[in-house]
Amino acid sequence: MTAEDAAWLDREYNPLLAVPDPAALFADWNRRSAATRETNLHFSDIPYGPSAGQVLDVFPSTRPDTPVLVFIHGGFWRGSDKSAHSFLAPAFTSRGATVVLLNYDLCPAVRIETILAQVSHGVAWVYRHIRAYGGDPQRITLAGHSAGAHLTAMLLARDGTSERGGLPPCTASRALCISGLFDLDTVRHVPFLQPDLALTRESARMLSPVAHTPRDGISVHAVVGELESSEFHRQNTLLGAHWGTSAVPVTEAIAGRRHFDILDDLSDPSTRLHGLARQLLLCEREGADRPPADLSTSDR
């Protein structure tokens, strides 16, 4: 790989380069999330596994027996934290959904393979325990951003991980993948990431959603910010191309958004992205004998 290729990959895969003041961006997320925790019922740092990173937060709805949105944060598998994303919860809990924010251990302390097994255990924990928080374990929708979208897609891939932590078949069959990474063979060549990720040709293939087939009966909405780099657009398109429209019925760009501010749309009920998440949450499981929770766009 030439120096020009390396520099191009670093530019394409570093969305912080498009942010004038990254510190201010994350400070704003943390401020909004802290305010959310101060004013909304939640249960923080519930362990779902033995390590320090295997914890989750639950934001219950005021309504009983609600659909569940499990959000997996990004950070290139090596950074960020669920606590910065609490601001996403109120738009969903106020309209009849339970929100779970999932943490995991980070590279380079662990490998991506370990992270994948951890999030699988985390979703299995949600399935087994979410009824105690008012959620319906039969109506779990996954959502992930960036590296979290990769982990989300792998959970829905056939043979995506050899250890699913007891996750029942088809329990989590709907997902929203935001600005995801689905071809890790390219990612393993990105210079600024490789020291922490230590991906090999073999591990990149094993960990790439596009190298696997989708599980039966899944529905994935794959989106990317219109203003993101060409590689993030290519990654988003790849998932639909490899998995097909029956598994990925939505593959689109969100107008006017970049890699980070796209999450502002997820937290805004008036936007297309929030609407896509709501469509997934409202999808009844096969054989359901009652209507889903009301996730209308109007406040109550």
Image (cartoon, rainbow, N blue to C red):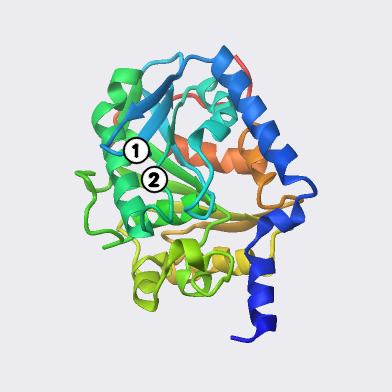
Question: Are circles 1 and 2 on residues that touch, CB within 8 Å?
Answer: yes
Q: How many marks?
A: 2
- The residue at 54%/53% (across/down) is 146
The answer to whether residue 290 is seen in the rendering is no
Amino acid type, label 1 = Gln
Amino acid type, label 2 = Asp
- The residue at 35%/24% (across/down) is 135
| Residue located farthest toward the right when viewing the structure as drawn | 20
Viewer-side residue, 35 vs 174 = 35
**Cα distance between the residues tagged 1 and 2:** 7 Å
Q: Position of residue 12 (x, y in %)?
A: 66, 67
**Looking at the picture, does residue 204 appear above or below residue 296?**
below
Q: Position of residue 123 (x, y in %)?
A: 32, 40
Instruction: Determine whether the residue tagged by mark 2 lies in a helix, strand or loop.
Output: loop
Q: Name the residue beneath numbered marker 2.
A: 105
Q: Residue 54 carries which label?
A: 1
Is 259 placed left or right of 103 in the picture?
right
- The residue at 73%/52% (across/down) is 255
Label 1 vs 2, first from the N-terminus: 1
Q: How crowded is mark 1: few (under 14 residues within 10 Å), some or many (20 or more)?
A: many
Viewer-side residue, 85 vs 159 = 85
- The residue at 80%/49% (across/down) is 20
